Amino acid sequence: MTTVTPFKKFFGHAVLIVASLLVLLPVYWMAVSAVEPNADILSSTIHWIPTHFQPGNFSKALHAQPFGRFFLNSFVMSTMIVVLQVITSSLAAYALVFIPMKRKRSWFFSILLAMMVPMQATFIPVYLILSSVHLINTYLGLVLPFAGSAFGIFLLRQGFVSIPKDLVHAARIDGASEWKILRSIVLPNAKPMILTLILLNFVFHYNDLFWPLISTSTTNMRVVPVALSYFLSQEAGQTLQWNLLMAADLVTIIPVLALFLAGQRYMIKGIMGSAIKG
Amino acid sequence: MLPTNDALGSITDNDAVTVKTSQRRLLRKSSSLYRFTHWAFLGPAMFFITVFIFVPAIYVIYLSLLHWNLLSSHPKFVGLANYKYLFHDSDFRTALSNSGIVSASMVLIALPLGLGLAMLADLGLRGTKLYRTILFGPYVIPLVASGLIWSLLFNGRHGLVDQVLSIFGIQGPNWLGSQPYALIAVIVVTIWQFTGYYMLIFLGGLQGVPVGLKEAAKVDGAGGWRVFTSVTLPSLSPSIFFAVVVCIIQSLQTFDQVYIMTNGGPDGSTTTLVYYIFRQGFGMYNIGPATAASVILLVILAVLTFIQLRVSQRWVVEA
C-alpha cells in the first residue's frame, strides 16, 4: 500500500461516508415509513424519526395477502434452482477439467455460446415449450429453465482447475470412481467456489421478477417480488398505503440482506475475482 | 444470471487440451474408456442448456417470421414483415432509444462513480471493509424492492426527494408522471442499485495495478493526476472495458424498475426494449413483433457478450 497523505485520508473518508449515507438513506427511509402511520409519510414535514410508532404495520401488511405462502414459494423455487445448478454444473465442470475427452473445446465453445443468450430474449419460446408440457404456473415451470447454467459451469470450472491433477490421478489409481472423486476430493476442495455459486444464485433467483411474473398466474404460485408488484397495483391510487407497502418491502429484503451479510466474503470475492482473473 | 465471466480466461491453461503429442494416444484410449462417463457428467447440464437456451434461441428466430396472435389465429408465415413493422413502429424506436439512454447514462455516470469509489476504497483507509459492504449492499436488494422504495422517495410533493429539494427552494417536478423526469428517476434507481457492483469490478482491477510502477512514477516526479492517467488508467483499461460491456449488457435488460415505477409511461417515455417485448408479447399477444424485437435484443447482447469474452480472454493471456 502506498502512503496516504492526511488530506487524501480526510477526502477519502468524507466521500466514502457521503456515498454510504446516500446508499443507506433510502433503506432507512423505508424502515421509518414501515413503522409510521400513512398520514405521517404524506405530511409535509420530514420525520427522520417516527413520531407515532406503529409496529402493527408489519402484521397488517403480511396479513393483507398470503405472504407466508409467497415466501415459501420463493424459498422453494430458489433452493430448487440452486440445488439443481450445483449438481449439473459441478458434474459438467468436473467433466471439462478432469475427464479426458475429444472435442473438449467444442463443448467449451457451446457453453460460451449459451452464456450469450439472455432469458429476456427467449422467454416467449421458453413459455411455449413449458406450456406445451403443461408446466406453466408450477414449481417445475419456475425452476427448470435455470436447472442448467453456463455461468455455474464456468464458476466451478475456475475452482476445479486449481485443484492439483495429481490428487485426482492418485485417487483413480486407488480405484475410486469418477463420481467418488468428485464428491470426496474435488467438491471439498472447491468449497469457496461452490459457496459463491450458491449465494449469488440464491440471491439472483430470490430477487427475480421477470420469469415468475410471466410463468405464474395464480396467487398460490406467486413469489415475493411478484407479490410486491401486485401489492402496488392493487393499492394504487389515493388510498395507497405506503406504510404497509414499505413494511412488506422491508420484510422482503431481510432474507437477502441477512444472506449477504453472512456470506459477503464469498459474494464480494466472486464478483471482484471476475475482474482480476477475467 | 449475468455472466461475471469468472474462469473464462483459463480455457487453455491446466487443461487436458494441452497434452503433448506423446500422450495423445493415451488420451485417445482413455477417451473411449471415459466416453460413457463424460456423457453422464456433461449430460444433465447440456440437456437443460439445450432445451432452455439453444432451442428457444432458434425457436424465437422462427417465431419472428410468423404472424401470430398467441390466443386465436393460426400462425402464418410472413417473412420479415415483423421486422419491417418494428422499423415503422414509433413505440419500438422510443424503446430502443430509451434503452440506449439508460445504457449511456450508466456508462457515463455509474461507471466513473464506481471507479472513483473504488480508488478511494483502495487507499486502505480504516473502515474500508464497512464502506465496501454498504456500497455494494443495494446490489443484493431485489430491484422490485428498490423500485418501491424509490417510488416513495419520488412520490410527488410528499416524497423525500422533493422535500429535500424544497429546502433549497427548488420545486420538484412530478417525477414519475412527467417527461423526461420519469426516465431520470428510473436511471437514478439503476445507478443506486448497480454502482457498488461496478466499484467491486474496479476494486478487483485496481489490485492488479503494479504498486512498484506507481512508486516509480512518483519518484520520477509525477503528480497524483499524472500517476492516475499514465499508470493507473492504462493498467486498469481491461477492467474498464470489461465494466463498460457488462454495464451495457445489464442496462439493456432493464425491466423491473420500469415495471414497478412507471409501467413504461408516461406516454411510453420509460418503455425499454425488454419492457416493449414484454408488453407486445404478454400484454397484446403480438408474438410476431415481440419475438422480432427479441431477436434484435438477442443479437445486440450476443455481440456484446462475445466482445466481453474475447477481451477478457486476451487480457488474461497478457496479464
Image (cartoon, coloured by chain):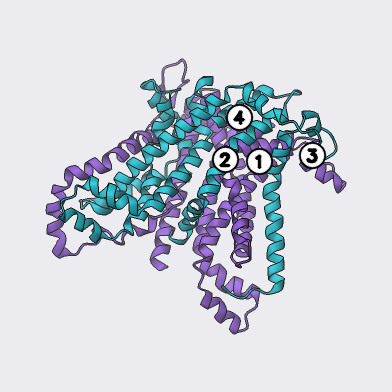
Chain colours: A cyan, B purple
Q: Chain of mark 2?
A: B
Indicate which disc, 2 or 3, sits on the residue closer to the N terminus: 3
Residue type indicated by callout 1: Val
Determine if residue B258 is in view: no
Residue neighbourhood size for the residue with mark 2, other residues' Cα within 10 Å, grouped as few (<14), some (14–19), many (≥20)? many
Frontmost of labels 4 and 1 is 4
Frontmost of labels 4 and 3 is 4
**Do the residues bearing badges 4 and 1 touch, measured as CB atoms within 8 Å?**
no
Give the side of residue B97 with respect to residue A265, left or right.
right
User: Residue B223 lies in what quarter of the image?
Assistant: bottom right
Frontmost of labels 4 and 2 is 4
Residue type indicated by callout 3: Pro
Q: Residue at x 60, y 48 (%)?
A: B137
Indicate which disc, 1 or 3, sits on the residue closer to the N terminus: 3
Give me the disc on residue B186: 1
Q: Give the residue number, with chain letter if any, for mark 2.
A: B254
Residue A236 locus on image (x, y percent):
70, 24
Indicate which disc, 1 or 2, sits on the residue closer to the N terminus: 1
Q: Give the residue number, with chain letter if any, for mark 4.
A: A228
Q: Quadrant of the C terminus of chain B?
A: bottom left
Residue type indicated by callout 2: Thr
Tell me the CA gap for discs 2 and 3: 23 Å
Q: Give the residue number, with chain letter if any, for mark 3.
A: B173
Residue type indicated by callout 4: Leu
Which is nearer the eye, A222 or A105?
A: A222
User: Residue B216 lies in what quarter of the image?
Assistant: bottom right
Q: Are marks 4 and 3 on the same chain?
A: no
**Do the residues bearing badges 2 and 3 touch, measured as CB atoms within 8 Å?**
no
Q: Residue furthest top?
A: B72
Helix, strand or loop at label 2? It is loop
Tell me the CA gap for discs 4 and 2: 18 Å
